[in-house]
Image (cartoon, grey):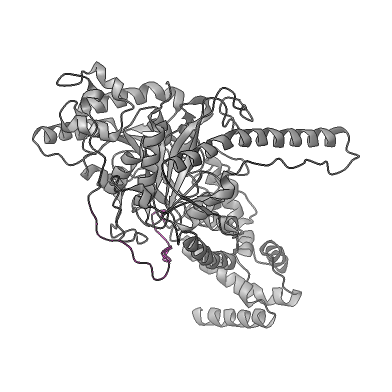
Amino acid sequence: MVKSLVASRRRFLAVTTAAGLGHTLLPGALLALATGASAQTPAKGSADAAEEKLLPITVEMIEQAAAIAGVRFTAEQRKVMIDNLTGQREDLVEVRKLALPNAVAPSLVFDPVPPGAVLETRRRAPKLDPAPHIVSIAGEGHAVSEAGLEQLAFATVRQLGELLRKKKITSTGLTKMYLSRLKRLDPQLHFVITLTEERALKQAEQADREIAAGKYRGPLHGIPWGGKDLLAVAGYPTTWGAGGFEKQTFDYDAEVVKRLDTAGAVLIAKLSMGALAQGDLWFGGRTRNPWNTRQGSSGSSAGSASAVSAGCVGFAIGTETLGSISSPSTRCGVTGLRPSFGLVPRTGAMALTWSMDKIGPIARSVEDAALVLAAIYGPDGHDLSVRNAAFNPDFTQDIHTLRVGYLKSAFEAPVMQEIKPPSETLAGKELEAFKARAAGRKAGFARAAYDAQFNTRALAVLRGMGLNLIEKEMPKFPFGALVPMLEAEAAAAFDELTRLGRDALLTGQLPFDWPNQFRTARLYPAVDYIQAARARTLALAEMTKLFADVDVIVTPSSGAQLTATNLTGQPAVIVPNGFRGDDAPPPPDAGDGALNNVGGPGTPVSLTFLGGLYGEAKACALAHAYQQKTGFHLMHPKV
């Protein structure tokens, strides 16, 4: 059987190579068409639907699949291909029978490090600013009263850590205060999936005993935190924010959770995330932005950013594949630190895209985020993507020794392009539709023009700090064309949802939501996935050149850089950069929880500091100096 199948495939290769098609072998498009077709559709939302019956592969199917894949075969070639494709599908079915769990990573491991690069591997203790003056935080006296703890809700990790170390507060009191705030504000913000109260109080009591005995573990000892609910925690559900997974549990802790346990931090909640790491909509509702509770918090680290912003945790852990730390940090006015790909182990965390997922902190300040990252990074022997690279933040560094670039065109004021109707004879509904599109574009331009002032001011502040900014531009490269790699990997990570119809259980069912994206990805050619991976090698080279003569690049938080740096692995520090005034243009849709309810008066904007691969420390140093100069991170919503 194996021998005859191999021979059959060799004949197929010979035919297609002779036809000039050897580099575009019929991909997963045909297999998806044949596998997805059935005489009976599984019951909608059925979690235990049986594998669909596979129909015989026909020349008509091959023709349709070839059209989707963008290749052509002759009628005779399609006939010859049937046996080979049937054999491929048999192999596909055998692999499906393995029922691969989400935790099993592909054997191919993405490595963004360019040839010849030398990584710093020696770990050193973070160099921090002087400890905060705790009298100004806690007031005079020997300890903070229980009633006074509420006033510390928006204190930084550094401040809270100093109060704990000096025994002015207890971890137990701090934990109870934050738990109380989570319970009180969750009905409004929808940011908690599961409270880990019992675990938290035990950890807090242990922290108090150890600190009282002089066994201080460091700046995170006794600090309450919240984790995005894709981190496994033994004894509690890990829901991934998704319908159908509400009662899912694991009997182990994620590596990041273990490391924060070791640092003495206190896990108090598993926070909301958009279903399967998309957006801010989960099975319990839409997580809200504390600055405007009619808006979603953005995602997918929705609850992590919202809870930090609302003063309900000392810090939180989020993840990013393509904006999931950056976007909610921007929306909620907090500080996000997306590390380089391969710095933090993802063991025990839900996989969305093995070659792009990154775990990082969301906090109130850059210094806080750096302290958290210092506790969770480094190889664990399980996540094979993690490199032995050091993260040595130094906030005493003279920032004038840094080579700082900025994306010049990204800071330029937008220009309104003329809006012309496609025809001078438009009338009726077509004319009304054109007018609506034109009005939408004008409104969008007004919002972009308003926000441009924050970028202009940021450059002025940086130059006022004595920095010589070097003009840079993003490489002319089709980074967006590589995004289907993400979608294909995600579809593989949740293969059974699509095949068994369980994707109907997910809350979001719009065209951009995962169910439709996963179905579409089934038709993404395997050969073209490899071609995209090869193109990604070129993208890595282009981004390496971009950072060749700079240590840090300053940029608005959106735009082409967000896609590019997520694909090629560079780190980013996202910081608040001001707040829109009462004169700000209104959101496109001010409806409660509306998808386009974004921006508007009183909402935050952000600025991003990019580092070269494993250059988090330099990006943090500059971002911290900027925060100290501007003070936007000290503002908080009145919730």
| Residue most extreme to the right | 425
Per the rendered image, the range of residues in magenta is 101-124
Relative depth, front residue between 262 and 401: 401
Q: Is residue 225 magenta?
A: no
Q: Is residue 109 magenta?
A: yes
Could one spot residue 281 in this view of the protein?
no
Residue at the image point whose x is 84% and y is 37% from the top: 430
Q: Is residue 303 above or below residue 260?
A: above
**In screen coordinates, is 301 left or right of 511?**
left
Q: Is residue 187 above or below residue 296?
A: above
Q: Quadrant of residue 438?
A: top right
Q: Is residue 548 above or below residue 464?
A: below
Q: Main secondary structure of the magenta part?
A: loop
| Residue most extreme to the left | 213
Percent position of residue 440, x then y = 71, 34
Percent position of residue 82, x then y = 65, 72
